[in-house]
Image: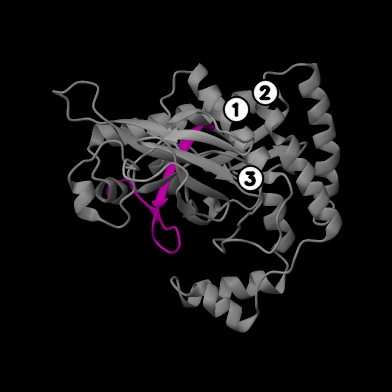
Amino acid sequence: MTDHRSPGTLIYTGSTKDIFAADANELLFRFSDRYSIFDWGQMPDAIPGKGVASAQFAIAFFELLEAHKIPHHYLGRGPTNDSFLVREAESNRNDPEYFQSRPTHAFVPLEVIFRLGVPVGSSLLKRYKTLQDWQRAGFDRAYSEGEKLPHPLVECTTKWEPTDRFVDATEAKKIAHLNDAEWNGLQSLASQVAVILRERFAENGAELWDGKIEIAFLPAARDDEQTRQFQVVDSLGLDEIRLTLDGRPLSKEILRQHYLSSKWFAGLQDAKQQSRDQFKKLCLSTVGGPEPLPVELLRAVTEVYRLSPALLETPRTDTREKIETLRKELQIACASFS
């Protein structure tokens, strides 16, 4: 916790945001114009205004959760438009003994992914190849690219390994030291969040396909219970979800698609096959880093991010006007690969 840190102390700098100490057990998230794809870390361009848009998107997300009585750690807006305040959750990376103690108010050491369909480019079809694979996941048939699922599918990956790795329920429960009731509760929370988001985005004409959320433990509802509760933590924005508008990717997928045919991406994939720990260093030594974005693509992507918080607003006239402008800019942003 942050009790011993002075307010304003920089605690962490990530690829998209900086975290500062605030009051006791509180943090200030300040979002930057940086972005990251393919586990690379900071890319060469900054997207002007992305930090403000990301903060406002996340604030709208937490306010939506609050309206649906979903537990979360959001406390309120920060001193600047690119920031907000949260309750701190403990983060003990790669410390199995810590999670054996069954902590509360701590990050669950898993990345939690919800899936509502099979979008273009989804990794789902690489892992669900047979009818039996789908049946084990709770579905009565196999699904193909472009189809929506009848109910959310929740998956987990490792959280603090150099490259995220999918894990099954048995390994996920072992990593996080979850009992069966907690595992079910975690899946239920992720499914609820997925449905809430899907419905709001649909009201504004967008389709949600999948997303990634951070979850932290909360104490059991009663002292005599062994099953811990959960809350949604960190943030959510276009970097953590996959949306489409008029069939076009309205997310970081725009940026991923731009780089898929690049020499850098091919070299990165080769490097990841050779080393899970040193892939970035290996890639830099062979093909170098990514090239900057073309000027017009950067301009259009900037507008897409700027207008994106409107997608979480209650539909009204000014919201529809923003989304119409968003449609036009998205068409320009996707022109290079559509």
Compared to residue 179, the image places residue 77 above or below, namely above
Is residue 151 shown left or right of residue 161? Answer: right
Residue under pointer 1: 60
Residue under pointer 2: 313
Q: Position of residue 159 (x, y in %)?
A: 40, 53
Q: Residues within 10 Å of mark 2 (few under 14, many from 20)?
A: some
Q: Earlier in the sequence, mark 3 or mark 2?
A: 3
Compared to residue 20, the image places residue 255 above or below, namely below
- Secondary structure beneath dot 2 equals loop
Looking at the image, can residue 234 be seen? no
Q: Residues within 10 Å of mark 3 (few under 14, many from 20)?
A: many
Image depth: mark 1 or mark 3 in front: 1
Q: Position of residue 153 (x, y in %)?
A: 47, 38
Compared to residue 300, the image places residue 226 above or below, namely above
Furthest-left residue in this view: 224
Q: Which residues are magenta?
A: 150-170
Residue under pointer 3: 119
188 or 49, which lies in front? 49
